[in-house]
Image (cartoon, rainbow, N blue to C red):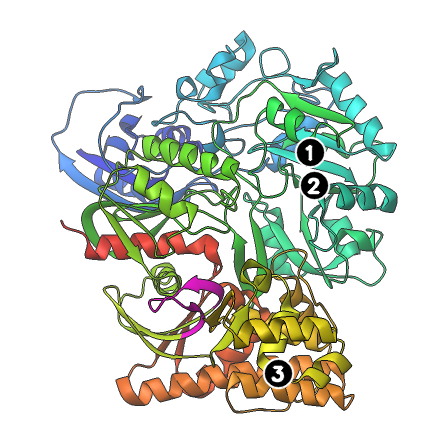
Amino acid sequence: MIRKRIRVYGIVQGVGFRPFIYRIAQEAKITGSVCNKGPYVEIYAQGTNDQVSTFMSWIQTKAPERSAILKMDSQIIPVESENDFTIIHSEKVKGDIFVSPDIAICDQCAKELFDPTNRRYHHPFINCTACGPRLTILDSMPYDRVRTSMKKFPMCPDCEREYTHSDNRRYHAQPVCCNKCGPELYIVGKDIHGEEALHYTKSMIRKGGIVAIKGIGGFHLCCDATNEKTIAYLRKWKHRPFKPFAIMAKNMDVVKRECKVNEAQQKYMTGPQRPILLLEKQKNGLVSDLVAPDNPMLGVMLPYAPVQLLLFEGDMPDCLIMTSANPKGAPICREDADVIENLGDLCEAVLSNDRDIRLRADDSVMAWIHGKPSMIRRSRGYAPLPMMISQSKDYKVLGIGGELKNTFCLATKDLYYCSPYVGDLSDIRSVDALKQAITRMEDLLEIQPERIVCDLHPRYNSVQVAKEYGLPIMQIQHHYAHILSCMAENDYLDPVIGVSMDGTGYGLDGTIWGGEILVCDVHHFERKAHITPFMQAGGDLSSKEGWRIAVSLLQDKDLCVQLGVCSAFEYDLVFQMIQKQINSVVSTSAGRLFDAVSAILGLCRINTTEAQASMLLEFEARKWQGEGMNFHGDTTALVQAIAQRMFYKDDRSYLAYSFHEGLANYIVDRVVEVRKETGLSTVACSGGVMQNQLLMDLVRNKCEENGFQVLSHSMIPCNDGGIGLGQALYGMMNGEE
């Protein structure tokens, strides 16, 4: 006989891990115990050498689908006298914390939901050890019911029996409940509850109404995705003429009717995370063009909460708009009062429930590049799963993130926990949400940072929040943080050539940076090259009005007027601002180049939402199937060449593609020059502009043709939603141990 103490680290809370251990212990005829310690699950396993070896191998090979074992340690200890294997109550100890993200409804629960003979028939909060809310209901670790927002719902005798019997799949399922003892649906402001509330909501949607529906991590705005009149009203009310809405499809058959989807994409769509995935539209789909106007892509997800599955039952549209319920610039609403105050005038009904949301979590959004996911917004289903870095530092750091698409990162030792999506911090409500989320994540993960890392920009609200904590502050340059985030995701800590193509960031010289070639390691960076500087005139307006950048780059009044870039009056106004340096600043922003070319090609003069001009330019370029101009030269000359060809009526798609190709040539030519100087042959690509799939593919292919190793993002956004990770890496590698 031997006895081992085994410690299993990773996502092993909230995924049915202890019941799983109990079952395989019984099967292997092991005695001992299993206990959730918070940072890890601790197992005492006693039996013959063969029994214990088999048991340990089963831990790895048969682990629950939703678990993630990061490491497993074992130690031989003295044999004890015992006759059975038990689950013992959770015990809190210090150590690394792993919090499970929220998990989409599993197939078994979905089947029970629609089974009239099952006691959870039509129960909108059905869950088991393999599915249901986790992070968004959690008060503290270890993950037990008494430390979640489910603690106010005492289990009925039937649920308690399931919860306490090891042969049941709801054994130790912390949010377990049923129609008798769980949370309840209701219509806010009306005496309508339970299934009647659901029927009322569905009737409003069928009539063309817009409703707010409380989900796992916040409220959604929901309406019929085929009703053009309703969608037009929603766009007008939200001042959102172009930005796409996400849709929720009833099932994969509907997804395939609306979009082109391959097997790998389908696996992500149907998995436990259920993100919004950007897919190419089919030509004859039923979803209104107003859902994603002038856009060949559609953001689609499948139902992941039981209430969403119930919404589609019966005579209902099989595609619903399901977009975050929030006023422009504010975080997603998580309480009834938020919805009534901010969206009450818009909604025909608000379907809520009495299960509290502890931490907001928007839907995650991903594109698909190079045959793998490319995260755009990392939140529900993924946060706060940590990144692991091969160098461990005995230090605690908060990377507070940027101003746009804010997420933050808490780091300790070799673990980097990125938060759910917070939002744009120009709105004070998002600033408050950031503070609340930091406090809750610090408490859950038991990380009290010793240092905060933030951006250089003196007017960022994220910087002001960092200063309020009274901790030592490190400030690092925006585009350097982008490259560090790419290095962190790839766990590559040697020096790299960093290609940071972005919108705007505060430069070390007080100018606007955004098209940078850097040499980076984890301690410092050197700016080796950048796109050709130009004058950006008009302050904040210049980030929205691409025609202003076109005027600056072309400096040809007749050409600008004839191409429809601007009027003669507008040209004179901006040209004078540039000449006299009024409200103008030197810029190397790659994002503004896209805005300028989009205006020159007649695609978009003024952005109504972030990156509108850039997106339209990429979509236009993708229409071209042949070769481009293969332009090699500086970026101002590239833009001027595009304008001249447009004047002579060259094909617009050809010119859009040629701009992408020319910018990629410029980037790779500079990278080759830097290699000659430094000997470096690894390139890390980041920044919001690298979300452009065509540009990223061109840069990757051209770099690899020149013998470079290319690091890029996949599960961390390349946009500003990823820089908190880069900031945290810098703080960890340069802090005092």
Q: Earlier in the sequence, mark 3 or mark 1?
A: 1
Q: Residue 42: give x, y in percent of width and height.
A: 26, 32
Callout in the foreground (2, 3):
3
- Is tag 2's residue or tag 1's residue first in the polypeptide sequence? 1
Q: Main secondary structure of the magenta part?
A: strand
- The quarter of the picture where the N terminus appears is top left
Q: Does the stretch in magenta take in 104?
A: no
Q: Which residue is mark 1?
A: 308
The reply to whether residue 538 is in sight is yes
Q: Quadrant of residue 206?
A: top right
**Amino acid identity at mark 2:** Met
* Residue pointed to by mark 3: 554
Q: Nearer the viewer, mark 3 or mark 1?
A: 3
364 left or right, relative to 462: right
Disc 2 to disc 1: CB gap under 8 Å: yes
Residue drawn at point x = 54 percent, y = 84 percent: 636
From the image, tell me which residue sits under label 2: 322
Q: Local crowd at mark 1 within 10 Å, few (<14), some, or many (≥20)?
A: some
Q: Nearer the viewer, residue 476 or 40?
A: 476
> Looking at the picture, how far across and down is residue 254, in whole percent?
77, 49
Gap between marks 3 and 1, in whole Å? 52 Å
